[in-house]
Amino acid sequence: MVREETPVHFLKVFGCVAYIKQVRPHLAKLDDKGIKVIFIGYQDGTKAYKFFDPEAARFYVSRDAIFDEDARWN
């Protein structure tokens, strides 16, 4: 009997710091393209993650993210 392993490579530490890609129009070449946010969960029905930006009090849903699982928001 062959046992299939459940993939867990996409699981991240809840509450860790992440950086998501900014996609607003007319972004200049040397402007910051990343937003520092907090990882808060997974989007239902998709492969996207949910994030919260406490400075702007705004929620984001994105698949393009870099996670810093050892860092916490101060």
Image: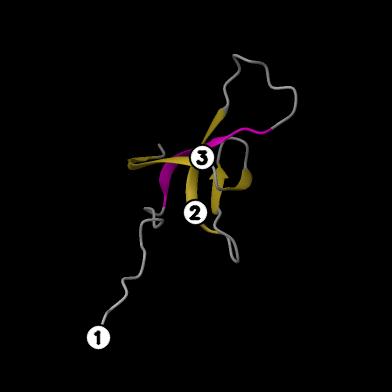
Label 3 residue SS = strand
* Residue that numbered label 1 is attached to: 1
Q: Residue at x 62, y 32 (%)?
A: 22
Residues in magenta? 15-23
Badge 2 amino acid: Ile
Q: Main secondary structure of the magenta part?
A: strand
Q: CA distance from mark 1 to mark 3?
A: 44 Å
User: Regarding mark 1 in the picture, which secondary structure is present there?
Assistant: loop
| Amino acid carrying mark 1 in the image | Met
Q: Please give the residue where the numbered disc 2 appears in the rendered image.
A: 40
Q: Amino acid at mark 3?
A: Val
- The residue that disc 3 covers is 37
Is 14 placed above or below 37 here?
below
> Which residue lies at the image location 62% right of the left edge and 47% below the top edge?
59
Quadrant housing the N terminus: bottom left
Q: Is residue 30 left or right of residue 37?
A: right
Residue 19 among magenta residues: yes
| Mark number, residue 52 | none
Quarter of the image where one finds residue 8? bottom left
